[in-house]
Structure formats: structure tokens, C-alpha cells
């Protein structure tokens, strides 16, 4: 006996049909829409078994179970879309204060004997000033690229 039974309303059924027929969405979103359409146990719905849906869509049966569960517990939007990340996979190397220090440094007079700052010199200087423990010249480049200020 299935614990999570999908019963779509007429509006939900129509919405999923138009989503799938347009084909203009992320592949995962379209697959989840197809799962919900096949799993629909409301009157007139196909009410396919998880194994049959998995076989027809060339996915794992566990995926079908998870989509069913999310639909029943959290609704249509949650079943179609990916779960948002609780935290980013990588924390930024430079926080707001460190970015500001980098910009100030880049806009300052370059070291004696140099016409301008290089990215490597900026990164090394941030480490010397103990703004960060370590930073690459590429991180410095990306950070400076984000700003609209001119480095003169």
C-alpha cells in the first residue's frame, strides 16, 4: 500500500499537461511533471505503479517515491522544483569587508617602482595585511570585475 497517493486537481492536471507539451523547462522539472501525471490517482487519472513509471521514464523508482512524497507533503511547486540549498556549497573567500579592502588597495598608489598593481600583487598584499589567510589572483580578479569602479 502506497503511503503517498497523488491526486491532482483539474487545474494541476492542466498545468502539468501544458508544461510537458511546451517542453520549455528544465529536464528534471519536466520529468517530475511526467511522474505526477502518471501517478495521478484521482478520478480519470492513470494511477500507474512506481515501478511502471520508473520504467517508462527511464528513472529510478526511488525518484518516483520522492516526487510523490514531496507533492503530498509540500505541494505541486515543491514536487516540480529542486529543493533550495540550505547553505552554499562553498563559502566565499572574500567577505564584504575583505572585498572593500581589495578595492581600496587596487585604487591606491602601486608599490614603489611599479606603474600599476598586478592581480598577484594585490592577492599577496591582502595576505600580508592579514585580511585573509590565503587568496588567489583569480579570486581578486573576479572580485574586482564585479565592481563598476575604475582602477586608476
Image (cartoon, rainbow, N blue to C red):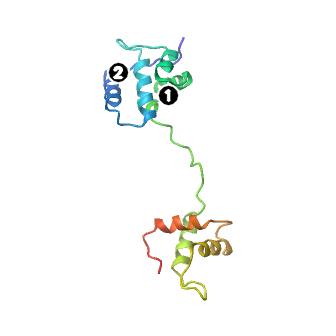
Q: Residues within 10 Å of mark 1 (few under 14, many from 20)?
A: some
**Which residue is rendered at x = 64% and y = 75% of the image?**
125
Q: Which one is earlier in the sequence, the residue at label 2 or at label 1?
A: 2
Residue 67 at x, y percent in the picture = 49, 26
Left or right of 99 on screen, residue 15: left
Mark sitting on residue 70:
1
Q: Establish if 123 lies above or below 56.
A: below
Visible residue check, residue 75 = no
User: Residue 9's mark?
Assistant: 2
- Residue 93 % position (x, y): 60, 61
- Viewer-side residue, 149 vs 69: 149
- The Cα atoms of the two marked residues, 2 and 1, are separated by 16 Å
Q: In this view, does 28 lie above or below 35?
A: below
Looking at the image, is 55 positioned above or below residue 114?
Answer: above
The quarter of the picture where residue 77 lies is top left
Can you see residue 23? Answer: yes
Amino acid at each position: 500500500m502506497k503511503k503517498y497517493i497523488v491526486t491532482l486537481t483539474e487545474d494541476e492536471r492542466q498545468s502539468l499537461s501544458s508544461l510537458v507539451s511546451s517542453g520549455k523547462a528544465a529536464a528534471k522539472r519536466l520529468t517530475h511533471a511526467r511522474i505526477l501525471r502518471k501517478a495521478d490517482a484521482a478520478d480519470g487519472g492513470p494511477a500507474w505503479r512506481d515501478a511502471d513509471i520508473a520504467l517508462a521514464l527511464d528513472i529510478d523508482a526511488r525518484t518516483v517515491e520522492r516526487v510523490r512524497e514531496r507533492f503530498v507533503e509540500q505541494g505541486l511547486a515543491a514536487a516540480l522544483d529542486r529543493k533550495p540549498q540550505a547553505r552554499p556549497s562553498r563559502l566565499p573567500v572574500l567577505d564584504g569587508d575583505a572585498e572593500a579592502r581589495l578595492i581600496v588597495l587596487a585604487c591606491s598608489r602601486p608599490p614603489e617602482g611599479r606603474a600599476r598593481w598586478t592581480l598577484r600583487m594585490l592577492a599577496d598584499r591582502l595576505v600580508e595585511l592579514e585580511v585573509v589567510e590565503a587568496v588567489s589572483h583569480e579570486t581578486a580578479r573576479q572580485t574586482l570585475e564585479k565592481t563598476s569602479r575604475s582602477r586608476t
